[in-house]
Image (cartoon, rainbow, N blue to C red):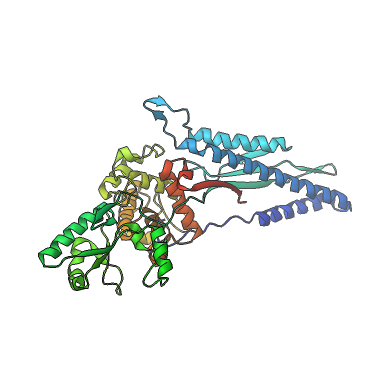
Amino acid sequence: MAEARARSRRSAAHCGEAGQATLLVIGALCVVLTGAGVLGLLARALGDHRDRRSVADLAALAGAEALRAARPGLFEPALVDGVPNPRHLERAAYLVRGRTAALATARRNGAAAVTVAFPDAGGLAPSRIAVTVADPIRVDGHDVPASVTSVAEVRAVLGAGADLSGSYHGPLATRQGRRMRPDVALAFDRLAAAAQRDGVELIITSAYRSDAEQAQLFAAHPDPKWVAPPGQSLHRLGTELDLGPPSAYPWLAAHAGTYGFRQRYAWEPWHYGYARSAGSRSVGFGPGDGRAGVPDFVPEAWAPAIGRAAQRWNVGAALLAAQLYQESHFNPFAVSGAGAQGIAQFMPDTARAYGLDDPFDAPAAIDAQARLMHDLLRQFGSVPLALAAYNAGPRPVAACGCVPPIPETTAYVASILGLLAGTGDPEAAGVGWEVRLVA
C-alpha cells in the first residue's frame, strides 16, 4: 500500500467465534430440553457440535492445502510456443480443486449439509476458503440448528533461503580496483573527470561490500556510528563510494550533487552515494521494458497500462505486475480496511501527492504506482527496500536501511519477490506457502 503504514493482519478469533456459536446452540437446546432435566442429552449435543466444528476445520484445511498445491499452475503461461501448456491452470479449475477437496473431506467425516465459499473470490488466486457444516443436531426427537463455519488460508512465509536484505545481486563494474554498480561506475567517471579538470584527483577507498565483508569489518570495529552492522550498510547496494583524499572534501561538497552523488552522513565527508538509480534494471532486477515483460498471469485488460508505465518510468513490468497482484489481485475497485483504494491501493494523501485524482482509475493508478516505485528505487537503490517503503512508508526503511521487522511488510516483500523469482515458484526466492486456520 502506497503510504507510511503497515497493514496489520488480524487473524479472526477462532476460539471466540466457536464459543459464540456454542452459546447459540446452548440457547436452542435449552428451548428443546426445557423441563426435561436431561443433562446427558445436553452434553451429548454439545459434543456433537464440537464434532461439527472439527469437521469444518478439517475440510477448510484440506481445501486450502489443495489451493496451495494448485497455485503454481495459475502462473504458468497458457501457451508455450503456440502449444497449450499442460501445467497451466485456469482460475475456475483452481477453485474447483479447493472446493472438491473441502467437500470430500467433510463428507468423509460424516457431514452432509456442506457449503464452500471463497471470501476473497474477486482476485486472481483466492487464498481463503470457508467451509460451513450445517447438519442439525438430533436431540430428544428434535432437530437443533448447529451451523459452524471454518476459514483457512494460504499465506506466504519466509524460508531459510529468503534474502530480504536488499543487497545488490546484479553485475558489478570496477574502478580503481573497487566494485560498484555499472551505472554508478559511469557516473563516477563523469565525477572524476570534472574533478580532474579542476585539479583534483579522486581516490576510491571503498565501494561495494557484501554482507560477509561488512560482518568482518563490523567485527573489527563494532561502532555502528562509523561501521554499520551487516544487512544495514548502504555499501551492500553497490551505490556507495568512500572517496579521498581529504583535500578533495570541499570540492566534493560543492560539486558531487551535480553528478548524482549525495553525501550520506554529515560526519563522513568522504562517503557519497549515487542517488539517481532510475529503475529496477539499474538495481539488478531485470529490464524496465514493456509488453514483453508483462507476465502471463496479468489480466489482458491491464497489460497495456502496465507496459506503458514500465517504459515511462523504467520500472520492470514484472515487478509492477507482481506488486499489483499482491496489493489488490488486479481489482480496480478494491478498498482495504485501512482506506487504501484501487488496483494499486493508494492512500488518499499519497494519491494526491502523485496527482492521482481517482485511485479507481486503474490505468492512472498503475502509472502513479510506477512513478512512486521509480522514486523509491531512486531513494533506496534496492527493490526489496523500495517495496518495503511502498508498504510501510519510507521512514522505517530509512531508519534501519533494511526491510523493517514488521510482519505485514516482511510478508508483503517476500510474496512479491517470490512471484518475481518464478511467478508461481516463490520457493526459488526462499519464500514458501503455509496453510492455517484463521476463523
| Residue 438 pos. (x, y %) | 60, 51
Of residues 164 and 82, the one drawn nearer to the viewer in this rendering? 164
- Answer whether residue 2 is visible to the viewer in this image: no
Q: Image check: 91 left or right of 211? A: right
**At 39% from the left edge and 36% from the top edge, which residue is drawn?**
296
Position of 96 compared to 135: left or right?
left
From the top left corner, tell me how far across and down residue 368 is, in percent: 32, 53
Nearer to the camera, 48 or 233: 233
Q: Is residue 125 above or below residue 187?
A: above
Q: Position of residue 283 (x, y in %)?
A: 32, 52
Q: Is residue 203 above or below residue 166?
A: below
x, y percent for residue 5: 44, 62
Can residue 196 be seen here? The reply is yes
Q: Is residue 179 above or below residue 149?
A: below
- The residue drawn where x is 44% and y is 35% is 76
- The quadrant of the rendering that contains the N terminus is bottom left
Q: Residue at x 49, y 57 (%)?
A: 408
